[in-house]
Image (cartoon, helix red, strand yellow):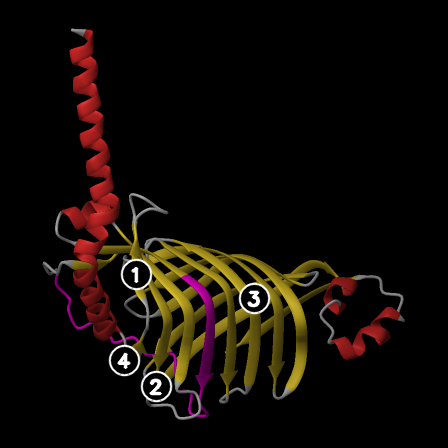
Amino acid sequence: MIKRIVKIFAIFFLILIILIGAVIFVIPRVYKTEITQKVEQIANQHVDGTVKFDEFSISIIKYFPAIIIYVKDLKIENEKFIDAKTVAEIKTTAVGVNFHELLKGKIVLDAIFIDEANLNLEVDSLGVANFNILKPSTDTTATSSDAEFKIRQIVINNSNIKYNDKSAPLTFKMDDLNYKGLGDLSAKAFDLNSTLTVSSFDFSADNVPYVQDKPIMAEIVTEIDAEELKFKFERNNIKIKNFPFSFNGYFSFIKDGYDLDLTMKSQNSTLEDMLSLVPPDYEEWKNSLNITGGIEFEIITR
């Protein structure tokens, strides 16, 4: 009797192992073509530009039960720009596919992972941005589409950003950026909770460098109106080198440009903290000073 029970359990566990193996190794291959087509379809539906990628793969082992789709060497281009046509070049881009929804016949993307990206963002002299490439949504009713965005997590690792606004003029550069954002990005309006670190940050305005090669640490909560493409900044803590500050206001995309109203503040900081931002050429001058005292200021940009 005992031997029979043991045999039944052995058979049961063997079948269970076979089923798990099927899930891990067979399902990704069965759905690979379908998921690839849906990813390309979604990109074409939402991006007003050219999207290219090379190697494509699917994994279910690392984050089981989530399915992760990997795309290698992704390139996004805006053909309307000549000098800044390439908006993004990304070594590895991955999206998470909800496994349980997939078994129901629906493809639901719920996470984005980006590694080693180079973003080249430019605004021309008329205020037109090369990165304003999202197509406006024309569907105001619910549909039975079998592919959906329900993004709740964005992770960016070891990436670089160059931004050049010729209408300001204003430029900044971020090297070795690491970012994690959490929020219900599928909602029409939501809060995005962000943490950010940057190894090297450069900033200049009117061709005058104000910050060079400084690290950044930040925690930011952004209220986002996805329909109006408006970003409202309310609660945040930012530190560049040793200098802490915060900002609030809004930034929104409008036809052929953008609108902004931002206020930057620093309170309870010291002169020494602020002077930690001076460019390398002024380090020797700063070190020769005896710096004491506090500082508070407010800068408004419209």
Name the image quarter holding residue 257: bottom left
Which of pointers 3 and 2 indicates the residue nearer the eye?
A: 3
Residue bounds of the magenta highlight:
114-141
Disc 1 residue type? Ser
Q: Is residue 52 magenta?
A: no
Q: Secondary structure at mark 1?
A: strand
Does residue 72 appear anywhere in the picture?
A: yes
**Callout 4–callout 1 Cβ contact below 8 Å:** no
* Distance CA(mark 3)–CA(mark 4): 28 Å
Give percent across and percent down for residue 126. 42, 92
* Distance CA(mark 2)–CA(mark 4): 14 Å
Q: Secondary structure at mark 3?
A: strand
Identify the residue under disc 2: 256
In terms of sequence position, does the residue under pointer 2 or pointer 4 come before the other? 4
Which of pointers 2 and 4 indicates the residue nearer the eye?
A: 4
Q: Secondary structure at mark 2?
A: loop
Disc 4 residue type? Asp
Which of pointers 2 and 1 indicates the residue nearer the eye?
A: 1
Identify the residue under disc 1: 57
Identify the residue under disc 3: 176
* Distance CA(mark 2)–CA(mark 1): 37 Å
68 or 208, which is in the foreground? 68
Q: Is residue 131 magenta?
A: yes
**Residue lying at 32% horizontally and 88% vertically, measured from the top left:** 79
In terms of sequence position, does the residue under pointer 2 or pointer 1 come before the other? 1
Disc 2 residue type? Asp
Identify the residue under disc 4: 48
Q: In the rendered image of this protein, does residue 20 appear above or below residue 82?
A: above
